[in-house]
Each structure stands twice: as C-alpha cells, then as structure tokens.
Amino acid sequence: MPLQNLFFPEYPSRASLLFLPHGVRVLSAWLLGWRAIFALLPGVFIVFAVIGGADVFLPSRLAAITIAVTTVPAVFYLLKWAGWDLFPRSDRKPCWACIMGVGVITSFLVSGLTNMAFGSARVEYVAYLIGDISGLFFLMLGLYFAFRFADGRA
C-alpha cells in the first residue's frame, strides 16, 4: 500500500491494486477444496482485526470474512457438480488457464459481494476487482518462475 500511495496518491480507495492473497485463496481452494475455508479463516480474521480493530465483529465485517473464505471453494465445487472437475489429480496435468478463469470469476463475485456487504461505492468495487485479478496474475507468474528456477530450467 505505501508503494501504491506513492504512485497513485490521488486514488481515493483503500483497496490494494495488487492483492496477492486472492491468488492464495484460489490456489488453496484448488488444492484443499472445502478445507481451504479452515486454512484461510485465521489469516483473514487476523487481517480484518488488524485493519478494523474491534469493528471486526460488525455484521458487515463478518459477512466479508465469510465471503472471502467461502466463495472460491464454492465455485470450484459448483464447477465440479456441473461436470467440470478442476481439482488436482495424479492422472492429469492441471489446467492452469482454467484455474486462472476460476480466479477471475471469483474475483467478480468476491468484489461484488464484499462491496455489497460494506455498502461501498463503485470505485471500491473496481479497485477490489483490479487488485484481485492483478494479484492472482502476478502470484501465478511469480510461482511459475520460482518453480522453473527451482527445477533448474531458468
């Protein structure tokens, strides 16, 4: 955020324009399924508590926490129910474009639902959307190069 404020000082939103945790949500839900909810919940709650203090227990904040941890696993399971199982299996390679697609879809859902819970302005929705999608893209790109480097193909 300090770097964002340096480059965009007039930007009115407090949302991050590079929100890497959305990528973590997507990868966690893809790898862990419904267990991602319990894996993500402590971290999401702590971040909301640090940012909002005692306001973390307001209904709008609790709704936003619920949205943040349940939306991505729910979309993966809805797609599986519809016949498009993206969860990892040893007998096939991951469809990275599909996982990115789920990340973009869930970004729209999380941004919309979170801003409805907070009653935020449209600029906040756009900021959440940009932050989620760019965070997902750059996290995946960073992991791609990190794994290539670790594999010795860099």
Image: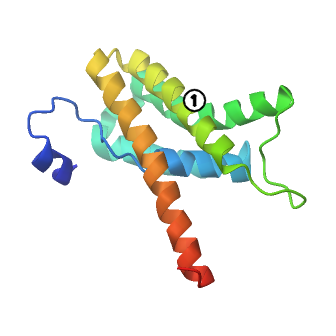
Of residues 71 and 83, which is closer to you in this image?
Answer: 83
Residue 22: x and y in percent read 49, 44
The amino acid type found where label 1 is placed reads: Ile
Residue 28: x and y in percent read 63, 51
Give the left or right position of residue 116, taking residue 102 as reference.
left
Q: Is residue 53 above or below residue 137?
A: above
Q: Residue at x 50, y 26 (%)?
A: 108
Of residues 23 and 33, which is closer to you in this image?
Answer: 23
Q: Residues within 10 Å of mark 1 (few under 14, many from 20)?
A: some
Q: Is residue 79 above or below residue 92?
A: above
Q: Which residue is mark 1?
A: 105
Q: Residue at x 69, y 31 (%)?
A: 74
Give the left or right position of residue 34, taking residue 143 as reference.
right
Secondary structure type for disc 1: helix
Give the left or right position of residue 71, taking residue 89 as reference.
left
Q: Residue at x 18, y 53 (%)?
A: 3
Of residues 120 and 47, which is closer to you in this image?
Answer: 120
Question: In this view, which residue lies farthest toward the bottom?
Answer: 152
Residue 40: x and y in percent read 56, 48
Q: Is residue 15 above or below residue 42?
A: above
Question: In this view, which residue lies farthest toward the front?
Answer: 153
